[in-house]
Every structure is written in C-alpha cells, then in structure tokens.
Amino acid sequence: MATPMELFIREMEELTCPDSIHIMDGSDEEARNLSELAQKEKVLTKLNDKVYPDSYYHRSNPNDVARTEHLTFVCTPTKEQAGPNNNWLDPAEAKTKMNALFKDCMKGRTMYVIPFVMGNPKSKYAKNCIQVTDSVYVALSMRIMSRVGKQATERIGNCADFFKGIHSVGDVNPDRRFIMHFPQDNTVMSFGSGYGGNALLGKKCYSLRIASYLGYQEGWLAEHMIVIGVEAPDGKVTYFLGAFPSACGKTNLALLQPVFPGYKVWTLGDDIAWINVGEDGQLYAINPEAGMFGVAPGTGIKTNPVMVDTLKNDKFFPTLFTNTAIDNSDNTPWWEGLSDETPADLTDWQGQKYDKSSGKPAAHPNSRFTVSIYNCPALSPEYDNPKGVPISGIIFGGRRRNTIPLVYECKDWESGVFTASIIGSETTAAAGGTQGVVRRDPMAMLPFCGYNMGDYFKHWLSIGKKTSKQPKIFMVNWFRKDENGNFMWPGFRDNSRIIKWMIERIEGKTGAKETEIGLMPEDNALDTSGLTISKETMDKLLSINKEDWKKEASMIEEFYAKFGDTIPAELKNKLAELKKNLGI
Ligand code: GTP
Ligand code: SPV
Ligand code: MN
C-alpha cells in the first residue's frame, strides 16, 4: 500500500511530468550537492568564502522581486468567507485554471519533493507539510526556512493530514502567475514566481493564510509577528510579540541590541508567530519558521550588528543573498546601508556595472538574505521549547510619517484589538505596486489573513476572553518625520528605550497619562540618556494632532464600512469612543 505521501508525489508526477524526482532528506551532503548543481545551472554563484562562508548569490528575473498581492487568491467555497480583504475565486474554477498551468510544466526539469515541519517537530503545535517545486533555489531556501527532510518524513508517516504546497516557477511570466490558496483542502498552488512569499509556501501561504484559517477553526492565532525575550539587568526575561507590516522593522527589532548595559534581546522569531492559550490561561508563542528571509537594505553594523554577524556564520548552511549588488573588489554582497561608503566597483542587482550618478540604488529595495535562525548569535535558548514562551506584551506598529505617536499603550485587550484593527501603514517595496501610500493593515495581516477580517477581529476578541493573564498591548511608530522629511526618532537600537518603558509598565513600575487615544508615557518617563534629541522633538514625537486624528477616524470608518456587519460591535463601540474623545 502506498503511503499518503507517496500518493501525493505520484499525483504531482502525473500532473507536472518531471524528468526526475528528488525527495529531500535534509542532510548537509544534500545541501552541498544542490548548491553545486545550482552553480552549474547558473542559478547561484558562490560568494567570498572567507567573509561569507557557505553563501551564494542569486539574481531573480527583474519582474519577480516582491510579493504580488493582486495575483494572490483565497479560494473558499463562498466569497464572504474570504472577505473583502482577499481576492477570491471559486475553488473549482481556480483548480481548473491552475491544473492547466501545471500540466506537464516540469518536463525537462527535476521535481524537488520537500517534506517539512513548521515548528519544532517535538511540539504539539507543529504542523506537517510537503511542497513540490521545480526550482533548486526554492528547495535550498526551504531548507533554511523550515525543518526539511527525514524528521518531517518520519513525523508524516502514514498520516494523510499534511499541507500540500504545489509550486512551479513556470516561465516566470507575470501573465501566468497565480498564488491560489485552498484552505478547505489544506493546499496552495503557486505558479510563475520564485520570490519568497510567493514561492516558499511554508512561509506566508501556509504559516499565515492557511494557518490563520486553521487557528480560527481550532482556537489559536497565526500572526505576522516577531517573538523576542528581553532580559533586564536583574536577569528577568520578558517575552514580547511584535507585529509590523512588511518591511517596517520586524527583523531589526527581533535582533535588537539594546543601548542600555545589562539589557539583552533574545531572538525567537522575526516574521511569524503561532499563539496558543496555554493550560495556565497565558498566551504562549512559537515561531514556526527555522530561518529569516530579511530585507537587506538598511542592515548595517550601526543599525543591526547582530544580523551582520548572523550572515557571517555558517553553523547551518547555506546562506543566500538575492538581488543585492555585488562588490567586485572582493566578491561580497553589498546593499545601501551596509556601509557608509558605496564601494567603487559594484555590479547592480540587474547585473549591470553600477553608476552611482544614476541616482538609483545598486541593490533592489526589496533585496533579501535567507539565513538560518540557528546562525543568530542572539538565538534564545527557549527557541526550540515545544511549549513556546509566555507572552507579557504585544507591540503593534506601522510606518507613518505623521499622526501616530512614538508610543502609546492600550487600556485593555479590547482597546488593543481595536488599535491593532486600525493600523495604517505606508506601502513598501515588499509588495509590488505603488509605494508610500497609507493603507489600513490591521494587525499587519491585511495581505496574510486567510479568511474574512471581520471574523478575524471576532476571533481576536474571543482569544482575549479565553486568556486569564492578558498581555499589555502597545502601539509604536518609529517612522514619524519632520517638516524636512527626516525621521525624528533615531530608531533601530534606540527602540530599546521604548521597550524599557514597556517593561516598566508591565511590571507596574511607572505610571502613564490618559489621552484621547490611550495611555502615554509621563513626562521624562522615556529614558533618553545618552541620546542627543531635543525636548521639542520628543514632544512632537509624542504629540497627538487632533486634525490628523480626525482624518484618521474617517479613514477607519471607511475601512470598517467595507466589512459591513462582520465588524464586531465591540470594535464599532471603540471607534465611537475614539470619535467622542476627539470631539467629533
Ligand atoms: P518583512 O520581512 O517584509 O516582513 O519586513 P520587516 O518588518 O522584517 O522589516 P525589516 O526589519 O527588514 O526592515 C525594513 C526596512 O526598515 C529596512 O530597510 C530597515 O533598515 C528599516 N527599519 C527597520 N527599523 C527601523 C527603525 O527603527 N527606523 C527606521 N527609520 N527604519 C527602520
Ligand atoms: C513580507 O513581505 O512580509 C516578508 C517577505 O516577510 S515575504 O516572505 O515575501 O512575504
Ligand atoms: Mn513579513
């Protein structure tokens, strides 16, 4: 009798007709062989082994450098189930469309079968998955981002309950590119893109879109969140979750090196968290991923020294760099922000000699590195704890040049859910389309929530009710700008100043003042010692401009209106309360 896994492989073979099949075992030897093969196929080139051991460079098709939200669909039986937050297609129609694209698409190619587990295989929260792909770059990336190979095959065993990810780069033609989610079938079909969020199906497709739907059914949350432990000088570690839209600072916060002596951030996750209510009624989080797919530009010794070190470690290999520039003087990857000086002899992300006077960046703004989390020197000893870590605080944020103050705290869980539901953020290069436009991005999940967001808000409220020790919820904005368009807050390592205040709030060591939007730091409560920032700037960063907020309230109203009656009454009441506070 064939196992369910064997049956799936056979089905995929019949559909895509590959020349050969490679079932991944996850071994180091396999990784070396695949890296060799990828070099022969000119998919990867080796970087300077002395500076970046076991690291490779990949240049993608210039039409395939970011997630493509307009080509991403959630195919639930009804359109209402997917909600106004998702593109929807009838599941049968979507399957017919995708089967036609996949028909014989792997002729002349190898089909990589990737058994993987999201989460520590020993954890009851972990999930079994299999992805097939015809891209060696995707196969190697999956090895870094998840637990691939024997441990997964063994866990899957004779079980038919696993996620099915079906992927082909096809001819990388945007006209034939679709990422189709079938939550009812625990399946994703993705065609025509090799880019991270479109192609590494364990990441956004499974661990957020499908998993959020599973969490809705089963009583847990799958979130676009970092997980960190912050150690204070007394040795106590406080665990936080942090949700920020794409390219708004998660990876940087997850690897933060605090400015205060005696404080340390322990990294557990930089993009995705699965959150369960534990037996003691507290929220516990695991990071289902095993690697980081991070934005390269802006990552440098001053901004994120821990990541610079991570990228030079090779405890787990390989490390991949995609669409950065190359410094020809020593064959190392380079991007804006890695060093103050732009190297003299660069090849840009499209393979051309870089001309600095062009005014264009040498690295693509969404160029990325793919690196194992085990290479991170700040990895928390609790990272592999099957139970996860108990959460005391949740930080939400967005990228806003105005309106949102540097930090405020929500009075309670319900206010926190409301505040998270109204997050606005300027769009970034992580997704195709116009950049810098403010859009509502509730919980930083707009592109990733696999079901109707009105139902999702209800689910968040219900999780709060099941939690006996609710974490404190905070809102931050690192990105407020002055009249000249400069960031007012130094950000990066200095964000530890805000986290220190949050810990003091969690421990009840400092007061806060009530404002129209929530609780804010009392005068001089934020520790700015050693920082040259004027009182005037700090006041501006913490100010609430009522006119801006009135505009904000009307944008929230417009956004809520799209969801009609699915928006829970509790949140509508909170909006009414906000408007009243603002005198509307
Ligand atoms: P995804 O991987 O797309 O989910 O992104 P992310 O949220 O992990 O964002 P990341 O930390 O990679 O940061 C994205 C960009 O924001 C990078 O160019 C960073 O340099 C920049 N950035 C991060 N933190 C700060 C900050 O505190 N202040 C400022 N001004 N920029 C920041
Ligand atoms: C994001 O866009 O939020 C990312 C990168 O983390 S991707 O994996 O492409 O989604
Ligand atoms: Mn992300």
Image: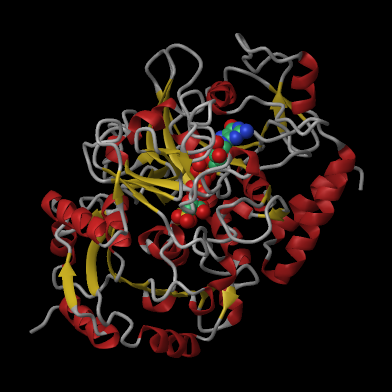
Q: Is residue 46 visible?
A: yes
The answer to which image quadrant residue 543 occupies is top right
Residue drawn at point x = 76 percent, y = 54 percent: 573
Q: How many numbered circles does the render carry?
A: 0
Considering depth in this image, is 198 or 115 the residue closer to the camera? 198
Can residue 118 be seen here?
Answer: no
Which one is nearer the viewer's eye here, 42 or 278?
42
Counting from the top left corner in percent of width and height, residue 141 is at 31, 55
471 vs 557: above or below: above
The image shows residue 45 at horizontal and vertical percentages of 30, 50
Side of 231 where 174 appears, left or right: right
Side of 384 where 429 appears, left or right? right
Look at 67% across and 69% down and name the residue there. 566
**Between residues 470 and 519, which one lies in front from this camera angle?**
519
Query: How does the figure colour the protein chain or chains?
Result: secondary structure
Q: Is residue 322 above or below residue 190?
A: above
Write down the quadrant of residue 514 in the picture: top right
On the image, the x and y values in percent for residue 255 come to 43, 32
Give the vertical position of 214 relative to 102 (above or below). Answer: above
Q: Position of residue 247 (x, y in %)?
A: 56, 46
* Quadrant location, the N terminus: bottom left
Instruction: Give the residue at the far left of this rendering.
Output: 1
Residue, x 24% and y 53% (percent of image)?
Answer: 147
Q: Residue at x 24, y 88 (%)?
A: 14
Q: Nearer the viewer, residue 252 or 452?
A: 252
- Extreme residue in the top direction: 530
